[in-house]
Amino acid sequence: MENFQNQPPLDFSKEKNRKEMGKAISNARKQLGWIYSLIVDKTKVYTQKNIPSINPALYNEIVGKVSKASVNNAEEAVSAANKAFNVWSRITPKERAMYLLKAADLMEEKRFEFAAWQILEVGKNWYEADAEVCEAIDMLRYYAEEIIRLGKPILMRPDLPGETNSYGYRPIGAALVISPWNFPLAITCGMTSASLAAGNTVILKPSSQSPVIAFKMVEIFREARLPDGALNFLPGSGSEIGDWLVSHPLIDLIAFTGSKDVGLRINRLAAENPGKRGIKRVIAEMGGKNAVIVDSDADIDETIKGAIASAFSFQGQKCSALSRLIIPKNIREEFLARFIEAVDSITIGSPEDPGNFMGPVIDANSLKNIKNYIETGKKECKLLYEREVKRLPSQRGFFVGPTVFEGSENCVIFKEEIFGPVLLVIKAENFDDALRIANNSEYALTAGLYSRNPKNIGEFKKEILANVKYINRKITGAQVGRQPFGGSGMSGFGDSKAGGPDYLPLKFLQIFMTSEIISENTMRRGYAPLD
Ligand code: NAP
């Protein structure tokens, strides 16, 4: 990466930024309940059925009503994306990059607005909402720069007279992008911009919990004057149109981020239903059950700060979130006494108030699911901390407080992804035991270590199976171009890292593009233009 720089986050200690953010939330509030369309080719399509998007902090408030695609709408979108592929795939990589860079500039101009929608639609706090907008802008700029680099074919054996052999890449076809609600802008934008940069056209099926933000992102691409049909917006129920789209013969690749169960289903259906252009390519970024190891000599202040941020920011609803905290038995008591006090100081309430660290979880189902896991935890483990009900927000939202258990590797909450603010503490006999416990999971996404012992740090780097390893820092908040992100095991399939050098060469090129070698006998006319 020659020019790429991460978008700096906003400094909310500055009054100007606080005022702008407040204004953006008020403006977004004035648009609550608006009706949004599908976008198929160049047409905005309003359907009879729609998806109500609910403010999770105030569940009688409708953020927006988004048209809900039927199978007929989906058929039209597939046909539009395939038609547009003839145009978009022939545009040079550099020109495609220009569209992405334009979209990045437009998003940067509207960064407060985009952050405001995150706060209202998914309940992110100000800092998390802003960080996500930065990440989305980074994705656009990073992939733009990458496709310029990769768009130039490599000359193989240029020393041989009489022939030229150029090795390059070409796009695949129509991509189905299926995104989750927990990073409704950054991940949606990342998968969409990677597909587009590669020269594929896109049918975007956003999560039914966050379709308004996805619509706003698509509008940015329209403002950037992306050719009609290159990006089609198709919100709809995963169970109603998802299987149908995944199985469609004119879908060539699928970029999915979401749960393990849905990822595995997509993988199976895609393999069983090849496309007209061949076997479908699938990337599935899935869940996590991430561990942090606290070493006996760890800096406890730093560890507590990092563990709280990793386990409870955005209410633990991150694939990278900490859910298993492993502590050696010799520091257990001292550590837990201080840790639990820190957990008790977490503020929870409306995400519109920047004083709140935690907000609501996404919806009623998720709240119920988390509460069920808490009940299971109470049966199997020792409850160390639960927020008193009277200290939870009284407003009507999906709030659950931070919860900490201590237990063993046999507990259900040791094994299953909860996707909520529930943390399990596990006692380790020694450092080797801690490494073993951390690796005892079907998932392999993020892992962390707090330690001042070089030998143990070295062991952690070598032995831990999670693909994104952090040492003496929190395990969430990966940044594009700095901590390329993605897992293996049940955490991910199509093993390469978003926002990193392999995403284009591996995912981008093995999934979003296909390589080709062009060998030309140049003796015939004596010369061949190199490009
Ligand atoms: P989800 O329930 O799997 O949904 C993800 C997307 O899949 C949604 O757009 C959903 O649509 C769609 N979908 C559901 N059923 C489908 C089907 N049969 N065919 C096609 N699409 C279908 O996941 P989520 O609750 O949105 O997100 C949370 C999960 O994502 C967690 O497990 C988290 O760890 C994971 N995640 C992983 C990463 C990573 O990088 N590894 C990043 C973020 C999140 P509907 O909304 O309409 O059902």
Image (cartoon, grey):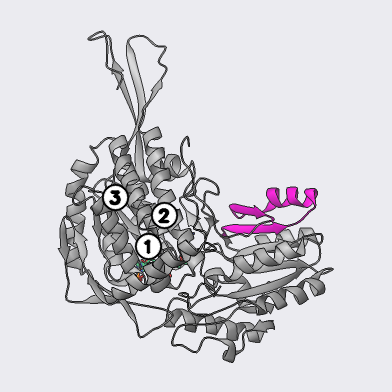
Q: Quadrant of ligand 1?
A: bottom left
Q: State if disc 1 and disc 2 touch (CB < 8 Å).
A: yes
Residue at which label 2 appears: 136
- 184 horizontally vs 36: left or right: right
Element type at mark 2: helix
Q: Is mark 1 within 8 Å of ligand 1?
A: no
- Observer-nearest residue: 8 or 511? 8
Q: Quadrant of residue 249?
A: bottom left
- Observer-nearest residue: 60 or 458? 60
For badge 1, the amino acid type reads Phe
Task: Tell me which label, 1 or 3, sits earlier in the chain.
Answer: 1
**Can you say which quadrant of the picture contains the C terminus?**
top left
Q: Residue furthest right?
A: 330
Task: Tell me which label, 2 or 1, sits earlier in the chain.
Answer: 1
Element type at mark 1: helix
Reply yes or no: does residue 450 show up in magenta: yes
- Measured as percent of width and height from the top left, residue 108 is found at 38, 53
The residue sitting at 49% across, 58% down in the picture is 10
Residues rendered magenta in the picture: 444-472
For badge 2, the amino acid type reads Ala
Residue at which label 3 appears: 252
- Observer-nearest residue: 224 or 227? 224
Residue at which label 1 appears: 114
